[in-house]
Amino acid sequence: KRRRVEEEVTGWTSAVLWKMNLDTQNAAAVLARYLGVPVRAVTFAGSKDKRAVTVQEIRIKKVTARRLAQLNNGLRDNVRLGKFVENLSDPLRLGDLKGNRFGMVLRDLEENLSEGDIEAAVNSLKTMGFINYFGMQRFGTGGYSTHTIGLKVLKRDFEEANRMIITPAPLVQGLREPDEQRVRAREALFKFNDGSMDAATAINYLLPSMGIERTMLQTYAKQEKATDHDGAFHSLPRTVRLLYVHAVQSFLFNQMASLRMKDESTRLFAIRGDLVVQEDDIKKYSQVCLVFRCTGAASGVS
């Protein structure tokens, strides 16, 4: 019966993904593993922050809404799915979204700050604006920044790009020590990179959240020798591959933004060559709000 129901879904099923302390790529990898589908079958329009509570639409190929809803019984408390629509004709692609809406919480403020000080700071942001740099979300927190990997991809040096992707992030002093399972996973990735462990063995040590590393190692494991670096890189979903290239663009934007703001005499005024968006143009964009009713940080979805 389950197979017959699944076959009735011929297109893409939309769902709203609610997540906390998990980036979009890893959330997609977790969902794909639970569903038994390739990671590329889980599509989204943009990557949302790891260090946040985020809500975004995803679309998954040929999976029923019932099956997605049932995942909520087995997923960890930091991932939930809801608001399903079946049989859509198209996946989501990077850039499909019109924008983001943020709610910010400021913590650990200085005790001597008054409400007037806070209001003045907020008004300054409203009137003076700020430099909208790309941050950690775009450049990642892995062993190498995503724009560094992107430069290798642009040079088609996939062997080095893959090594960088698989390299775990360095441990940060002052943070809690990783648990034993994470330590073993890190050791396995380092050993694969230096050639002392084969891909098929290293896979057994990976954490469920290591979806990108798992996909690449699975491709390497199918080879007699792990030498098809082009194939391993292109086994990643297109959305993930593009993120590395887009990170290079973001790095260049940050560099140019800093150069533009260097001259204090022109920071607050448009000069020749600036792209200016007028307020009337901004109002043309519609806002789409995807709402969850949640009770507590580890809530269910309605």
Image (cartoon, helix red, strand yellow):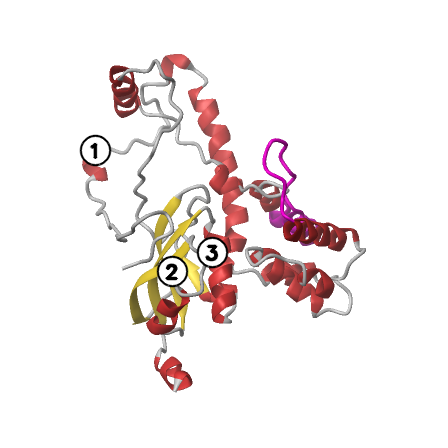
**Distance of label 1 from label 3 (alpha carbons):** 36 Å
Quadrant assignment, res 85 = bottom left
Q: Which amino acid does label 1 sit on?
A: Glu
**Distance of label 2 from label 3 (alpha carbons):** 16 Å
Work out which quarter of the rendered image holds the C terminus and state it: bottom left
Give neighbour class at mark 2: few <14, some 14-19, many 20+ (Cα, 10 Å). some
First in sequence, mark 2 or 3: give its number.
3
Look at discs 1 and 3 and give the one toward the viewer.
3
Q: Is residue 135 above or below residue 95?
A: above
**Distance of label 2 from label 1 (alpha carbons):** 29 Å
**Which residue sits at x=57%, y=43%?**
146
Judging by the rendered image, the residue that carries numbered circle 1 is 279
The span picked out in magenta is 152-179
Identify which residue, 259 or 96, lies in the foreground: 96
Quadrant assignment, res 198 = bottom right
Question: On the picture, is 300 further left or further right than 216?
Answer: left
Q: Is residue 294 above or below residue 1?
A: above
Judging by the rendered image, the residue that carries numbered circle 2 is 92
Question: On the picture, is 44 further left or further right than 180?
Answer: left
Work out which quarter of the rendered image holds the N terminus and state it: bottom left
Judging by the rendered image, the residue that carries numbered circle 3 is 27
Q: What residue type is labelled 3?
A: Ala
> What is the secondary structure assignment of the residue under circle 1?
helix
**Which residue sits at x=54%, y=48%?**
244
Give neighbour class at mark 1: few <14, some 14-19, many 20+ (Cα, 10 Å). few
Horizontal and vertical percent position of residue 50: 46, 45
> What is the secondary structure assignment of the residue under circle 3?
helix
Look at discs 2 and 3 and give the one toward the viewer.
3
Residue 22 part of the magenta-drawn span: no
Q: What residue type is labelled 2?
A: Leu
Q: Is residue 217 above or below residue 126?
A: below
